[in-house]
Amino acid sequence: MIELSLHVLDIAENSTRAGAKNVYITIEEDSAGDILLLEISDDGAGMKEDMLNKVTDPFFTTKTVRNVGLGLPMLAQAAEKTGGRFSFGSKEGEGSRVAAEFRLGHIDRQPLGDMASTLVTLIAGNTDVDFIYRHRHNEKEYILDTRDVRIEIEDVPINALAVLSLIREFIQDGLREINSEA
Amino acid sequence: MPKISVADLKKIKERVREDNSLREGSQRVKITVHMGTCGVAAGARTVMDSLMGEITEAKVTDVVVTTSGCAGMCSKEPMVTIEMLGQEPVLYGKMDANMMRQVFKRHVLLGEVQSSFAIAKG
């Protein structure tokens, strides 16, 4: 993946396919600690314990249409090549949590890229799922919670193009205001 | 911390309400951008951005956009399926932003299937 935001899109799509109702996307940029943390957690189906240590095996997948599963291994590799780490936790019936920690200033770290586009794509494709996106840059924080958006737009579908365009603008403005450096 | 502008959302709500065609069930076209790991890595999100830009520009309101997972034809990604009311779905492969623009303008708006990009029908 050429951008970390594409990893976020890919992993969050996993959550929606695991039947999640809420997907929490958290990004934390800590300049002093030289850390960029990506975390995606959900309340989807989760996994059995015996599957947990196989998720970073590229030849393990739960899908039947093909016999490779590259999403999590690629994210793990991207994190580890910057001197960071990857962790995965899941409990059957409760949900899953993926965390990847990057060295913020490492030369091999991909740019975060277009998070607004990632969120809009997720919302457009999964109208029955709520996304809670929290992005912290040192002391500043931006939050987008689609549950709040739904309250405001009432019966207007959240995937109406006008709503999606506005959400895209909100995120772009929000990330500019917290001076995201990733 | 910037919050959602309530005024903006209210404006959108009024605007969209005036246009009944946006209600579910009255869509003429459903466009699915395949968004598995393979699709995302091959550029599906750029295709999606291009598609949303085209729909906004054309000011059409009877087109709904969605995503799907990997269909097992990873080498043909990014793939896009166009389903028009009363017609067989058409699957396009190896798409990019420009091809998406062409497919939207010619197939979705004018009904001309772009057979040079299409990989399957039905």
Image: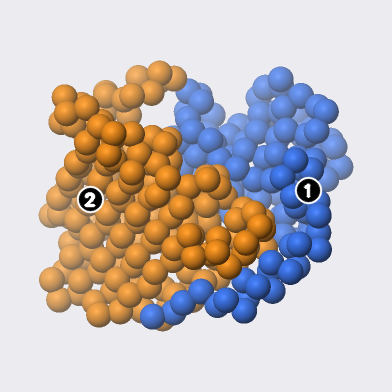
- Asked where in the image residue A137 lies, by quadrant, the reply is bottom left
x then y, percent, for residue B60? 79, 54
Task: Indicate whether A7 appears above or below A90.
Answer: below
x then y, percent, for residue A53? 15, 31
Dots 1, 2 in contact, CB < 8 A? no
Task: Indicate whether B8 appears above or below A41.
Answer: below
What is the display colour for chain A? orange
Nearer to me, B105 or A24: A24
Number of the label disc, if any, that sits on residue A36: none
Q: Quadrant of the N terminus of chain B?
A: bottom left
User: What is the three-letter code of the residue carrying label 2?
Assistant: Ala
Q: Residue at x 71, y 20 (%)?
A: B122
x then y, percent, for residue B27? 77, 43
Q: Secondary structure at mark 2?
A: strand
Give the residue number, with chain letter if any, for mark 2.
Answer: A99
Number of the label disc, if any, that sits on residue B62: 1
Q: Residue at x 50, y 39 (%)?
A: B35
Left or right of residue A88: residue B64: right
The chain letter for the residue carrying disc 1 is: B
- The answer to whether residue A77 is visible is no
For the colour blue, the matching chain is B
- The answer to whether residue A158 is visible is yes
Task: Indicate whether A176 appears above or below A82.
Answer: below
Q: Secondary structure at mark 1?
A: loop
Q: Residue at x 71, y 28 (%)?
A: B90
How crowded is the residue under tag 1: few (<14 C-alpha within 10 Å), some, or many (20+)? Answer: some
x then y, percent, for residue B114? 76, 34
User: What is the three-letter code of the residue carrying label 1?
Assistant: Asp
